[in-house]
Amino acid sequence: MNATIEAKLNVLVGAIAGTQPLASALKLAAKDAGAIARFGYALLDADEAEDAAACGRLAVALDPKNADGWLVLGCALGRAGKDAEAILAYEQTTKLRPKHARPFVDLAELYLARLEYTRAAACLKSAMALDPGAATTAGKRAQALAVKTLLTLAEAG
């Protein structure tokens, strides 16, 4: 094995072992956060929520103002059932991207799943003020959630 590859592997092994932070081990910087978040979106599409969450966490660690990192993190945590953490990530996304409807729709969906209707309605109002089409997206997602909830209740019996 050549010395350069061996040195890089040793740094990576140190990061995995916890003796060196992964971001510094891989020589990552704030400018890399966007690419890492985009990789997180790809992992979400592949239903790899845990790995997507790791990408989101790394992206926001590198750049706390990276809205895509926060959105990936919120989506991944929501899929993993970590609602409280997902809400915090979505709220951060809405602060960083107050003129984008998607994080408000995602947050509303999470509140609906938690039966927090007042909060869900506030998020939906924000989303619809930004994009009137958000109501259609939110409605379809709410219908799917309602069906899933009913099926779960029916199975529980």
Image (cartoon, grey):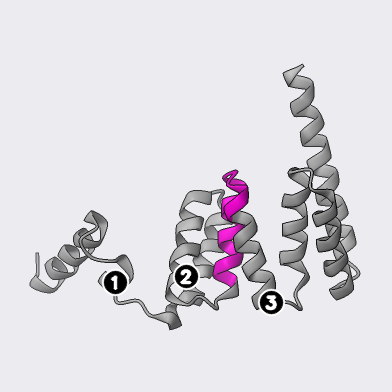
Helix, strand or loop for disc 2: helix
Which of label 3 and label 1 is nearer to you? 3
The image shows residue 153 at horizontal and vertical percentages of: 77, 25
Q: Main secondary structure of the magenta part?
A: helix
Is residue 70 highlighted in magenta?
yes
Name the residue type under label 3.
Answer: Arg
Helix, strand or loop for disc 3: loop
Name the residue type under label 1.
Answer: Leu
- The residue shown at (86%, 44%) is 143
Real-space Cα separation, disc 3 to disc 2, in angstroms: 16 Å
Image quadrant occupied by the C terminus:
top right
Mark 1 Cα shell of 10 Å, populated few (<14), some (14-19), many (≥20): few
- Marks 1 and 2 in Cβ contact (< 8 Å): no
Quadrant of residue 45 within the rendered picture: bottom right
N-terminal label among 3 and 2: 2
Q: Which mark is residue 26?
A: 1
- The residue shown at (15%, 63%) is 10
Most extreme residue toward the top is 157
- In the rendered image, which residue does mark 3 sit on? 97
- The residue shown at (75%, 74%) is 100
Q: Is residue 66 above or below residue 70?
A: below
Mark 2 Cα shell of 10 Å, populated few (<14), some (14-19), many (≥20): many
- Marks 3 and 2 in Cβ contact (< 8 Å): no
Name the residue type under label 2.
Answer: Ala
